[in-house]
Image (cartoon, coloured by chain):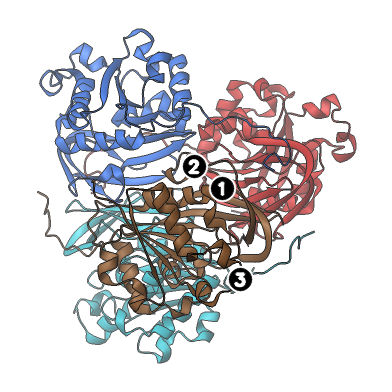
Chain colours: A red, B blue, C brown, D cyan
Amino acid sequence: MSRPLQVTVWNEAVHEASGRPASMATDYPDGIHGAIADGLRELLPQAQVRTAVLADPEHGLTEEVLAGTDVLLWWGHVAHDQVSDEVVERVHRHVLGGMGLLVLHSGHFSKIFIKLLGSTCSLMWRNEAERELVWTVNPTHPIAAGLPHPIVIPHQEMYGELFDIPEPDDLIFISSFAGGEVFRSGVTFHRGRGRIFYFSPGDQEYPVYQQPEIRRVLANGVEWAAQPDVPRVAPAVDHPPREWFA
Amino acid sequence: MSRPLQVTVWNEAVHEASGRPASMATDYPDGIHGAIADGLRELLPQAQVRTAVLADPEHGLTEEVLAGTDVLLWWGHVAHDQVSDEVVERVHRHVLGGMGLLVLHSGHFSKIFIKLLGSTCSLMWRNEAERELVWTVNPTHPIAAGLPHPIVIPHQEMYGELFDIPEPDDLIFISSFAGGEVFRSGVTFHRGRGRIFYFSPGDQEYPVYQQPEIRRVLANGVEWAAQPDVPRVAPAVDHPPREWFA
Amino acid sequence: MSRPLQVTVWNEAVHEASGRPASMATDYPDGIHGAIADGLRELLPQAQVRTAVLADPEHGLTEEVLAGTDVLLWWGHVAHDQVSDEVVERVHRHVLGGMGLLVLHSGHFSKIFIKLLGSTCSLMWRNEAERELVWTVNPTHPIAAGLPHPIVIPHQEMYGELFDIPEPDDLIFISSFAGGEVFRSGVTFHRGRGRIFYFSPGDQEYPVYQQPEIRRVLANGVEWAAQPDVPRVAPAVDHPPREWFA
Amino acid sequence: MSRPLQVTVWNEAVHEASGRPASMATDYPDGIHGAIADGLRELLPQAQVRTAVLADPEHGLTEEVLAGTDVLLWWGHVAHDQVSDEVVERVHRHVLGGMGLLVLHSGHFSKIFIKLLGSTCSLMWRNEAERELVWTVNPTHPIAAGLPHPIVIPHQEMYGELFDIPEPDDLIFISSFAGGEVFRSGVTFHRGRGRIFYFSPGDQEYPVYQQPEIRRVLANGVEWAAQPDVPRVAPAVDHPPREWFA
């Protein structure tokens, strides 16, 4: 397969529109989606990266866009409820058919993540700008390639256990916070033919997505989740005659 | 914990109401739910077993019934769409809070199973009354206790791979069929605080739920899924102060 | 099954014999094995708990002792090499046959643990008496019953990732340390018919095994690993005739 | 990474030397290792494939050979005991350091497989030239790419459950046999930095390794297990100062 990877970065972009927090103006002058897209373009120069936001028609996630997307990244926080169920169904169908999905930070409470995982996806949190250390516990996983051990994030919102998710297929990263909490901060799941990677570091109040190591994780995640050779068809019922293989 | 286990056997009971297939009259004179409940009463004499069906008000699954249920068994086939979304939400909430759930046979396409697993749950099937052999691949799992290897089911509908489910937490049984297909016929999942066991043998056309070994599997499954000491509360967001444990 | 559980606590007991560190005299007046055994007797009054040490004939682990042991606990640190290969083979055979095994702290480098897991079992460590927090990430696992979240251990040796073990069957506890490291501190494995639980807190320099929450973990672990109804026979080659089940 | 993959196919080559079974002369004129190597050369033309046998000095697996091997394939049957422990230790060390390992058919009883997995690796078997069907249960795993569902092997030795292995990291294939048995015929494990793939089809009495679909599985397995960019170093103890990352 030699065509360029097609990547879509989705952001609710509500913090951007409201101008709050004020630090967004300096941390994310092009929006969180802009920063994430920049990082991917830098590290995956062969990929074609576009962005889409909640305010776009159909949230920018039409059938055509999804059909042409190898990997979708999802950032949402305060507007999960405003995402239409129809678009969620559409994204779900594409994930089951083979589209990769990276769910980021507060996206743990997005409709699409909960629909794919089936649990509450709740967690413990506290926002006091504390240091997060991201430790690799699966060092030969492709998503962990080229990273320091640990990644040091100077200021970040704390996400702590219990993270109410099904047992992950791969546990790649565990974070600790200055306050002492731990969090399974990088985990993968498979649903249908699709690959899903959840990665918690990244927040509207801190310039985490500008940090080179975090950009490396996201680029690795995109490469891992992409399956350009898988036909975009979800598993379906089959009804063979007896001894059909004979 | 010494109170008796509370078990609710749910059946859509549409085959029973329609009298089709005609073999139901002899195979399941008290309905599929009646046969399953009889088996549980026989093997778990200390348990209190009741039944509920689609036609009951609120499908017989009121908040009060679920709050008083340690383990719910679910059999459905032709009427999945008639189960109200409100009841599915309620069952889902109780599973995440700790209620056990056994999903049986064609229940793989029930709303509740799909909502918990997040994939299509589709499979391959063929109904030609062929022999199914159920092999244990996890011999010290409590659900496998006291079973022959294999269980021989003389006549059964074939369910074959690909079974489109997430990777199970435990793979306990693999079946083969006379036609040569295989199926992961006994698998477990955890969602929230709840334990889920899917078991495929059992069909409206064959008296599988009258077979002693199958009854043993269901009784083992009920005992495994029951968590009478877990308070019925799903994991929820927690928001601790920094160094709250100090 | 109503006979009492048979538990054997094994300790190399070299620190005890040498009187080093001096704190052993006050922290563990009856030895580490004595403290562990006391905790089990307190919380599992129905169990019969004995101890065995390296200096005993056959290290106290004769065929007869192992055949009469439901769960073996293993503490070793500086004398792994002095454990005879013959005894290790014997313990290995009993684990595969169904004996439970709890491997504690520096036992990660014991011959028996490495033989069962197949990897180096190496880790990162530092001994500066720092605070360890033990977080539960699998709250309905029997080993996590009745514990605070987190368990706070005031002073402990740091064990950190990368812990070079196979992917655990269950990940129950993750610890953080004052220095910022994390560790998968409570993990389970199955080998043959046996259940294995590794738990890292506990060290010769700190009175961790006197702490009530840690004693609760070990008692829970013993109850989880015990399979008194499993005949002590490892899986073996079977050679059936064709259609042997017909 | 653009250097060619380095692959070593190891065979005890005792059937070849003894001329028994006589069918070897037509099924495997260049030996089982020869047939496997031919298949890899055909499907992975960029790889450099060599062979080694038990009778070679150091079984052909010197430190130099292993250091230059990305993936080792292992076929053994009647001479497991003749493999020297020193060579097994060497192979083990390289696997933990990142060398890929494919263990084939009766290699389930090889010293290296048992050393890596820690269980008996026993199974059920019967040799009556019966049909094996190999079903894919993980359709987007790289090892399953480009395969029919099922693969039909006309004549094969039966391997059946219980296969006494630890829970695999990935379950890719499940086989059924004409006699009705099932077997987890394609499974993966990780140990240290190494990737391990066990694949059961293939026997000295049947020309299974000449079958195109089987060759495809082995080629896929080699590509999956190869990690040419991983430095050949097993995880080891690290001993950081406190706050070493600050």
What's the mark number on residue A227? 1
Q: Which image quarter holds the C terminus of chain B?
A: top right
Q: D73 or A233: nearer the eye?
A: D73
Spatial separation of the CA atoms under disc 1 and disc 3: 60 Å
Extreme-bottom residue of the structure: D57
Q: Residues within 10 Å of mark 2 (few under 14, many from 20)?
A: many
x and y percent of residue B64 in the render? 40, 14
Q: Which residue is mark 3?
A: C22
Q: Are marks 2 and 3 on the same chain?
A: no
Q: Residues within 10 Å of mark 1 (few under 14, many from 20)?
A: many
Callout 2: residue from which chain?
A: A
* Amino acid type, label 3: Ala
* Amino acid type, label 1: Gln
Spatial separation of the CA atoms under disc 2 and disc 3: 59 Å
Question: Which of the 4 quarters of the picture holds residue A137?
Answer: bottom right
Can you say whether B156 is above or below B147 in the image?
above
Q: Which image quarter holds the N terminus of chain B?
A: top left
Question: Which of the 4 quarters of the picture holds residue B198?
Answer: top left
Q: Residues within 10 Å of mark 3 (few under 14, many from 20)?
A: few
Nearer the camera: disc 2 or disc 3: 3
What's the mark number on residue A193? 2
* Amino acid type, label 2: Arg
Can you say whether A7 is above or below C76 in the image?
above
Callout 3: residue from which chain?
A: C
